[in-house]
């Protein structure tokens, strides 16, 4: 009977040992699963810290597209301004339609008759009228081009100011500066 009791006690201890071993294995498995979950959570937290998602992202993208549109407008205005400046630099005092030559002004007064002198005076008066109309036309053209130049210059400055404002506005309210860290 003593052997039977020992056998039962041994069997009971073996069962307890097996139960403890199963519990230890289950605890190790759960511990390793928890460590794996904790590592994945830490990775997600690090990613979220370095690359935060914001409700401002659509607004930032809209701002970036508006800035690029403004930059293209500024570049186009700058090109127009350069073309207009080159036009002003190449503007000639007397245009091709002037048709005034030095030979038209040279007269030999010694052998000219009164009627030829009157003809020359009338020709000079017509030339004077033509030159005045050419000067008026050129002055009007110059005024128009100078108005266009200054309006383009004003538009260029306004677009530059607006672009600076929008860039500062974008930097002030943007979350992307946190992303770069």
Image (cartoon, grey):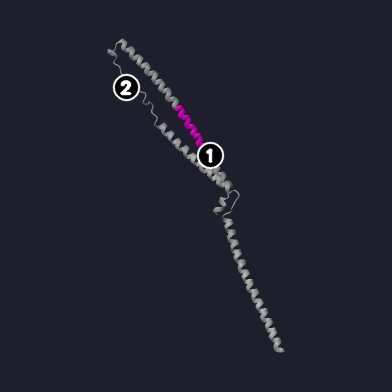
Q: Position of residue 139 (x, y in %)?
A: 44, 25
Q: Secondary structure at mark 1?
A: helix
Image quarter in which the N terminus is found: bottom right
| Residue sticking out furthest to the right | 1
* Residue at point 56%, 51% (across, down): 177
- Taken as a whole, is the magenta stretch helix, strand or loop? helix
The residue that mark 1 highlights is: 161
Pick the residue in front: 8 or 56: 8
Which span of residues is magenta-colored? 142-163
Mark 1 / mark 2, whichever is N-terminal: 2
Pick the residue in front: 111 or 34: 34
Pick the residue in front: 137 or 165: 137
Mark sitting on residue 64: none
| Residue sticking out furthest to the top | 114
The residue that mark 2 highlights is: 102
Asked if marks 1 and 2 touch (Cβ < 8 Å), the reply is: no
* Residue at point 36%, 14% (across, down): 122
* Residue at point 48%, 29% (across, down): 147
């Amino acid at each position: 009977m003593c052997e039977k009791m020992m056998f039962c006690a041994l069997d009971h201890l073996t069962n307890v040992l097996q139960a403890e071993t199963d519990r230890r294995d289950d605890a190790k498995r759960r511990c390793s699963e928890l460590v794996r979950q904790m590592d994945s959570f830490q990775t997600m937290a690090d990613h979220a810290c370095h690359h935060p998602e914001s409700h401002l992202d659509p607004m930032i993208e809209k701002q970036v597209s508006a800035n690029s549109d403004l930059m293209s407008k500024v570049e186009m205005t700058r090109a127009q301004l350069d073309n207009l400046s080159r036009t002003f630099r190449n503007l000639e005092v007397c245009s091709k339609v002037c048709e005034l030559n030095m030979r038209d002004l040279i007269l030999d007064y010694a052998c000219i008759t009164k009627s030829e002198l009157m003809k020359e005076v009338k020709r000079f008066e017509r030339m004077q009228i033509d030159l005045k109309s050419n000067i008026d036309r050129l002055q009007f053209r110059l005024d128009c081009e100078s108005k266009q130049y200054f309006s383009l210059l004003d538009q260029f400055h306004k677009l530059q100011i607006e672009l600076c404002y929008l860039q500062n506005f974008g930097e002030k309210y943007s979350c992307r500066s946190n992303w770069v860290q």
